[in-house]
Amino acid sequence: MGYLAYPVEQKIFAWLIAIGYLTVLTGFFIYKTITTQKELKLQRLYLRSIAIFLFFYICVRIAFIFSDIERDLHNYSNLYIHLVLIGYSFGLLAFLQLVYFGEKYLLGFQHHFLTFILSIFYVMDMILIFFPQVFLTSRILSYLGHYSTISIIFIIFLIVLIRTSKKAQQVAFLSFLGLLIAALSAFLESDFFITSGLVSPLISPLLLVIGLTIFTLPQKIMVRLIIEYYTNKKICLVHRGKIKGKIYFCQTCFVCYCQNCFENVILKEKLCWSCGNAIEAKNIEDLKLFEMEEMVTNKEKNQENKKIKI
């Protein structure tokens, strides 16, 4: 046994198993991204975001494995500090991708200020790698960046949930719960818990695998959640802005488009960006009539319900 108060070999073995599992999971999402039709742009972007997130998280764990070995051999050496900070940087990159996806494709912000703020944390992390004498400050900034990112992702989830059905809300909550479990695994791996013996070094890898599995498992339903969010909020799936004027729906998945994007993009590509359903020029009037009819029907139902209550 070296400087660490626990057998580092057991911890490394557990993390290697976890990394192997995450590698398979990452490969699955890369495969899904490649094999998904190019026309299904939203699905591809979501799957790609998950794949990038998992890839960088694997890099985090590899950096931390080497940092544990270095600390066990030479305690708090400069190399150990460098490896830890590199791991933190990879972690910020992993979460940064999710925030960027949520900010651009869900919130529809034209200026990605949330991504910009987190990018500043990342740049600061990279700079502080070369200043091991301020390691404690670097660690605090890294924790601040990570937990701020998780908070931002939670807020994005809440915004989306407000405009979705109960079933979609349950799935989204389950997915976010998985992310929280994964974050808890990183928290329990701190020196205080492991060195004091309060938590076994094997708990953290197990929680990470469980958390990321829960987070990524409902990926198909999460795509439907995003589509439902766009539809309920009357956001055009192409330019991701609010629709003014006529609204066109895909007859298969009912995702909506503005008139300009529908006529100049969807009809030229002849495919729905959401479900890949073939859309031809002859369907313009059908889609328009369906949308107008649906609105009238809902209005009439509301009026009938009011009369019944009276």
Image: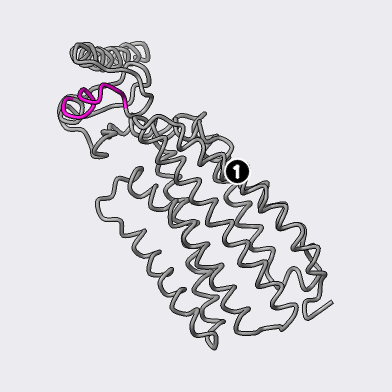
What residue sits 69% from the left and 63% below the top?
Answer: 188
**Residue 12 sits above or below residue 128 on the image:** above
Q: Give residue 190's position: percent from left, percent from top.
A: 68, 69
**Residue 78 sits above or below residue 58 on the image:** below
Q: Secondary structure at mark 1?
A: helix
**Residue 81 sits above or below residue 43 on the image:** below
| Residue 271 covered by magenta stretch | yes
What residue sits 56% from the left and 77% below the top?
Answer: 82
The colouring scheme, among rainbow, by chain, secondary structure or one colour, is one colour
User: Image check: 46 left or right of 61?
Assistant: left
Tally the numbered discs: 1
Give the quadrant of the N terminus. bottom right
List the residue tagged with mark 1.
25
Front-most of 93 and 223?
Answer: 93
Give the quadrant of the C terminus. top left
Q: Which residues are magenta?
A: 263-272
| Residue 75 covered by magenta stretch | no
Residue count near mark 1 (Cα–Cα under 10 Å), binned few <14, some 14–19, many ≥20: many
Quadrant position of residue 191: bottom right
Q: Give residue 24's position: percent from left, percent from top.
A: 62, 44
Quadrant position of residue 116: bottom left
Front-most of 272 and 269?
Answer: 269
Q: Give residue 236's position: percent from left, percent from top.
A: 26, 33
**Residue 286 sits above or below residue 74 on the image:** above
Q: Give residue 107's position: percent from left, percent from top.
A: 33, 46
Quadrant position of residue 264: top left
Work out which residue is located at the far right of the displayed protein and give it.
Answer: 1
Work out which residue is located at the far bottom of the displayed protein and give it.
Answer: 133
What residue sits 74% from the left and 80% below the top?
Answer: 73
Instruction: Give the amino acid type for the residue marked by disc 1 in the picture.
Output: Leu
Q: Main secondary structure of the magenta part?
A: helix
